[in-house]
Image (tube, rainbow, N blue to C red):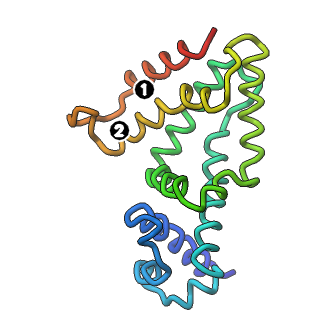
Amino acid sequence: MRLRDTEKVQLVKQKAIELIVKDGLEGFSMNKLAKACQISVATLYIYYKDRDDLIVKITIEELESMTQGIMKDFSPEMSFEQGLHQQWENRYTFAKNHPQMNLFFDQLRSSSYQSTLLSDSISAFKMTMGQFMTNAIERGEIEEMPLDVYWSIAFAPLYNLIRLDQEGKSLDGSPFKVTDAVFWKTFDLVVKALKK
């Protein structure tokens, strides 16, 4: 593939994510995407079989990118607090550098594409995170609990801070920006809630 074609594929991916975030999956079409990219619809079909193929391929690529960002400098052998600290840093950094991705994945979570989000493409990530939790339990750092309970306590507060920061509004409607003090205070409370 020539360099120009690679740039076109990147443009298509970027515009597809923007349109899905803005209009939702039901408002997304290949015609709208072609118009946003200022290319012909036929050009899209050079790269993708159809709308579903485009969405699935973009999702898998973005999941792999997110996984790499989240796993940076992380090991399942880390102590619970150290590993969770690294996860919070990595997840926040990824969200700041890719502000539309959480909104894009939110669209997919409540659609027929949800299975793509849970696909084999991130199985190594799921295994690593599962091993991290298992290690923390075996070392007696945290209680044994269902994965959904763990995730809700360990990461939901982080993603709520990210959402509030992206919206720029606190729950009471006043301006909001995540500060280091707010971020790490929330983290400390999460650790306190999970550690034995």
Q: Position of residue 106 (x, y in %)?
A: 49, 52
Q: Are marks 1 and 2 in contact (CB under 8 Å)?
A: no
Mark 2: secondary structure:
helix
Residue at the disc numbered 1? 183
Q: Position of residue 10 (x, y in %)?
A: 55, 70
Side (left or right) of 175 relative to 165: left
Mark 1: secondary structure:
helix
Residue occupying the point 52% across, 54% down? 110
- Indicate whether 69 appears above or below 78: below
- Give the Cα distance between marks 1 and 2: 12 Å
Closer to us: 92 or 22: 22
For the residues carrying marks 1 and 2, which lies nearer the camera in this image?
A: 2
Corner quadrant of residue 77: top right
* Quadrant occupied by the N terminus: bottom right
Residue occupying the point 35% across, 38% down? 164
Corner quadrant of residue 137: top right
| Within-10-Å neighbours for mark 2: few <14, some 14–19, many 20+ | some
| Within-10-Å neighbours for mark 1: few <14, some 14–19, many 20+ | some
Ranked by sequence position, the earlier of labels 1 and 2 is 2
Q: Amino acid at mark 1?
A: Phe
How many discs appear? 2
Residue at the disc numbered 2? 164
Q: Position of residue 102 (x, y in %)?
A: 49, 49
- Residue extending farthest to the left is 174
- Indicate whether 127 appears above or below 39: above
Q: Amino acid at mark 2?
A: Leu
- Indicate whether 182 appears above or below 125: above
